Amino acid sequence: DAKTTQPPSMDCAEGRAANLPCNHSTISGNEYVYWYRQIHSQGPQYIIHGLKNNETNEMASLIITEDRKSSTLILPHATLRDTAVYYCIVGFFGNEKLTFGTGTRLTIIP
Amino acid sequence: EPEVTQTPSHQVTQMGQEVILRCVPISNHLYFYWYRQILGQKVEFLVSFYNNEISEKSEIFDDQFSVERPDGSNFTLKIRSTKLEDSAMYFCASSEGKEWSGELFFGEGSRLTVL
């Protein structure tokens, strides 16, 4: 089973930052945090991943707490196209068998 | 931008029939996967494939399922005798494999409806 807990749904106003929390209190020392999203019924799309340090790419930022028991995905300027289900996944580096949970359904409101 | 392509986008079949779902992974990728998503449920791992053999499979991937890379470009999932509960969206994915980047590239999916 998925080792993460996410709120089932969130809303965010268009143009604002969307902050999606994830709890992974049982994460082990060498497990990474991965974020994917699924727009409508399309295939999941990779967003970002990290181990300890905060990470940023062209899509998002990932903030991992110092104790690594939780993290936050930040979409800095949400657009309507960011409406999707966002999945927080923990796993070992190099293990491409991803265990998806139920995710957070993010709705961007115009 | 390179992408994973899947065919057919939708297939309707009768229970007990054989189905083959096809995927063309990204050309320089070495690892290939099938995942499925029953309507309204989680995305589930089925199988991973590397170097022409299965590297890992889930409990779902029983004897009625098989995978093949017949010609160096296609990657197929065969369901030998379909059941009603096989109705789902099937996603193919690939990854570079040389240096794990954390990124699987998923296709748009093939919707299988078993009647």
Image: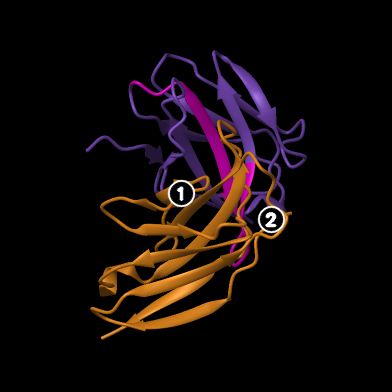
Chain colours: A orange, B purple
Q: State yes or no: residue B34 in magenta.
A: yes
Q: Earlier in the sequence, mark 2 or mark 1?
A: 2
User: Chain for mark 1?
Assistant: A
The magenta span reads B28-45
Above or below B28: residue A35: below
Amino acid type at mark 2: Ala
The residue positioned 67% from the left and 50% from the top of the image is: B86
**Would you name the residue on which mark 2 appears?**
A2
Q: For numbered disc 1, what is the local secondary structure?
A: loop
Neighbor class of circle 1 (other Cα within 10 Å; few <14, some 14-19, many 20+) is few
| Front residue of B41 and B23 | B41
Amino acid type at mark 1: Asn
Residue B109 visible (yes or no): no
Are marks 2 and 1 in one subunit? yes
- Furthest residue toward front: A66
Neighbor class of circle 2 (other Cα within 10 Å; few <14, some 14-19, many 20+) is some
The residue positioned 42% from the left and 57% from the top of the image is: A62
Q: For numbered disc 2, what is the local secondary structure?
A: loop
Q: Which mark is residue B13?
A: none
Above or below B39: residue B5: above
User: Chain for mark 2?
Assistant: A
Q: Which mark is residue A53?
A: 1
The residue positioned 22% from the left and 38% from the top of the image is: B1
